[in-house]
Image: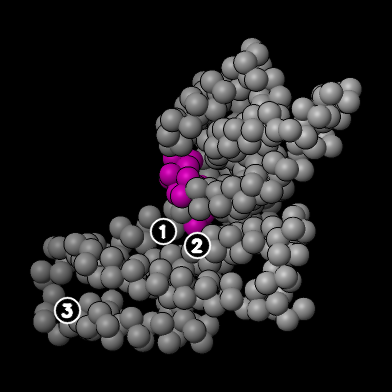
Amino acid sequence: MTKELFFLLKNFIRMAVLLSLVSIVAFFLVSISPIDPLKVNVGQTALGSMSQEQIAKLSQYWGTSIPPVRRYLSWAGDFLRGDMGISLLYRQPVAQVIGMKLSNSLLMMGVSWLISGIVGFVLGVVAGVNRGKRLDKGILAYALVTASTPAFWLALVFLMVFGVWLKVLPIGLSVPIGMEAAEVTFKDRILHGILPVLTLSITGISSMILHTREKMLDIMESDYVLFARARGEKVSQIVLGHCVRNVLLPAITLQFASVSEIIGGSVLVEQVFSYPGLGQAAVTAGLGGDVPLLLGIAVISAAIVFAGNFTANVLYEIVDPRIRRGRKKG
């Protein structure tokens, strides 16, 4: 029990250190950005007609007159106390803005993540079992094509085909235009999320297919599989009884590592479909010089990615008892 607690504590400390480094790097990049929050949000013309006192007050409000190190220490201290600051663009607490935007993105990213993982794993196993056959070549061709296809381009194609030409799905947003929140149904949210989910799923399947296929090829040529064939076991028995268990562990690791890819892809997809999620908020905050919101999104996104990696480490011990026994011996 002590070693398990030490394992969890070590990973939590590692996550905290990485989050601190992410916040420092993000703050440094924002500080050296050429975008001036005053010019972007007030306007060059309006800024030129203001007095020096008014400009000084605006600079203090936007934090441009405070040294970067002092700004970071002040922000980090408030963040640790649960105060992410006030969004300069939305005029609301950053935590409230992120919570609203994240709730829109989580369903889309979560469903895409599950679909890409499950479908990619199944297709990878099927391709590995049928090596060299037409089915394997077809799956492999699909994986190679989608792996080199930009997510935003695929989103534009889906938008043109299903939203403009066929007119069977909405062209954007997460809810119908002009409809009050109380009138929005779960069906409406599903319809508006189909194209973003489809885009993220298709682009995310390829890596799982290629990885699982390579692992399956190695396992199918292993000694214990050859021995199972010699005993007269069927292909389905070999795959389910020997192969899946051995290929599942690396697939789980890859799937949780792909959380960062889903988050990165959602930024582009949300822009194409005008989906009011966390990715679109990050772009708006970056272009508008909203430092508190941009830093909050960066830290929260990094925390989600690190949580995925942490979960993968925990599942390692659940799926593979050899790792747990090795730690006990050490």
Mark 3, Cα crowd under 10 Å, few <14 / some 14-19 / many 20+, is some
Q: Position of residue 232 (x, y in %)?
A: 89, 22
Residue type of the residue flagged with mark 1: Ala
Q: Is 122 placed left or right of 73 in the picture?
A: right
**Image point 74% across, 33% down: which residue?**
223
CA separation in Å, label 3 and label 1: 26 Å
Query: Tag 3, which secondary structure?
Result: helix
* In this view, 102 is above or below 12: above
* Residue type highlighted by circle 2: Ser
In the picture of the structure, the residue carrying the numbered disc 3 is: 55
Looking at the image, is mark 3 or mark 2 nearer the viewer? 2
The answer to whether one can see residue 11 in this image is yes
Q: Secondary structure at mark 2?
A: helix
Q: Mark 2 or 1 closer to N-term?
A: 1
- Residue type marked 3: Ile
Magenta-span inclusion, residue 267? yes
Q: Residues within 10 Å of mark 2 (few under 14, many from 20)?
A: many
